[in-house]
Amino acid sequence: MGFRRFIRMFVCLLAALVLEAALLPENAQHEDLSSRYPADGLRHLSVANSRDRARVRRGRSYNQMAGLNRYAELMQRNAGRIGMDWRLLAAIIFQESQFNEGAESVKSAKGLMQIRDVTAEHYGVDPEFLFDPDTNVFVGTKLLGDLLRSFREEGLDSTNVVRFALASYNSGGGALAKRRAEAVEAGLDPNDWESVAEIYRRTSNITPAYITAIEETYACYLDTVTVK
C-alpha cells in the first residue's frame, strides 16, 4: 500500500471517529444509497485543494469535520428539495470550496458552491448575497436539480445522470455538449461518462478528476456520516 493511500485511509478513519460522535443520532441506521449514487468502490477520502484556484475573502472558513457539522441542516434541507443524498451535496461543496463560505475563484465564482453572478441572476437572486451560505446553497442546488432533471429526461442511467450533471456543473453545459459530440465522432458512447471522460482527458483532466474526487469524498461520507 502506497504512503499517500495509507494517509487517505487514515484520514477517512479519523473522519469516521469524529463524525460519528458529532452527527450520528442515537440508534440511527445506516441507509444503503450506493445503488442511487454509486461510487464505484472508491472508498478513500480525497481532499480537494480549492485554494489552487480560489482566493479567500474575509469570512469564515471551516475544515472538513467542522464544515459538515456547521452546514449539515442547510445541506439536508436543500438536498431534499432535489431528491439528492445530502452527503453527495456535502462532497460537492467540499470539492468546490472546502466549506469556505468566503471563497472566491479567479473567475469570480463565489461562496460554498462557487456560484457566478450570472447563475444567481438566472434564478432571480441578487449576486450580492452569494457569500451568504443559505443563498449560495439554494442557488447551487437549484442549478444541480435542473441539470439532474435534464439528464434524466435524456434517459441516462442513474450513475451517468449524476456524473454528467457534475461535469456540466464543473465545465459548463456547452463544454460538455462539445465533448459528447466529439465522443460520437470518435465512435464512443456520448451517454457514457467514462467514454466522454476519455475525450476530456485529451485536453485536460480537470473535470474527470473533479468527479472522481467528489465520488471518493462521498464514498467516505457514506461510511462515516448517517443522519435520520
Image (cartoon, grey):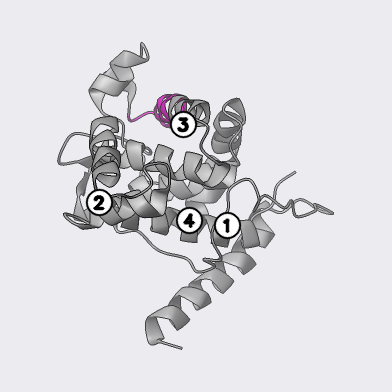
Q: What residue type is labelled 1?
A: Tyr
Q: What residue type is labelled 4?
A: Glu
Please say if 199 is above or below 42: above
Residue drawn at (41%, 41%) of the image: 164
Q: What residue type is labelled 2?
A: Tyr
Determine crowd level at label 2: few under 14, some 14-19, many 20+ residues with C-alpha closer than 10 A: many
| Camera-side mark, 4 or 1 | 4
Kindly identify which residue carries mark 3: 151
Residue 199's disc number: none
Give SS at disc 3.
helix
Q: Which of the two discs, 4 and 2, labels the residue nearer the N terminus?
A: 2
Q: Which of the two discs, 4 and 3, labels the residue nearer the N terminus?
A: 3
Kindly identify which residue carries mark 1: 221
Mark 4 and mark 1: Cα distance apart in space: 10 Å
Pointers 2 and 3 in contact (CB under 8 A)?
A: no
Q: Nearer the viewer, residue 85 or 161?
A: 161
Q: Which of the two discs, 4 and 1, labels the residue nearer the N terminus?
A: 4
Q: Which of 142 and 152 is in front in this view?
A: 152
The x, y position of residue 147, in whole percent, is 43, 29
Determine crowd level at label 1: few under 14, some 14-19, many 20+ residues with C-alpha closer than 10 A: many
Kindly identify which residue carries mark 4: 215
Give SS at disc 2.
helix
Q: Point out the stretch of residues depicted in magenta.
A: 131-144
Kindly identify which residue carries mark 2: 200
Q: Which amino acid does label 3 sit on?
A: Phe
Give SS at disc 1.
helix
| Camera-side mark, 4 or 3 | 3
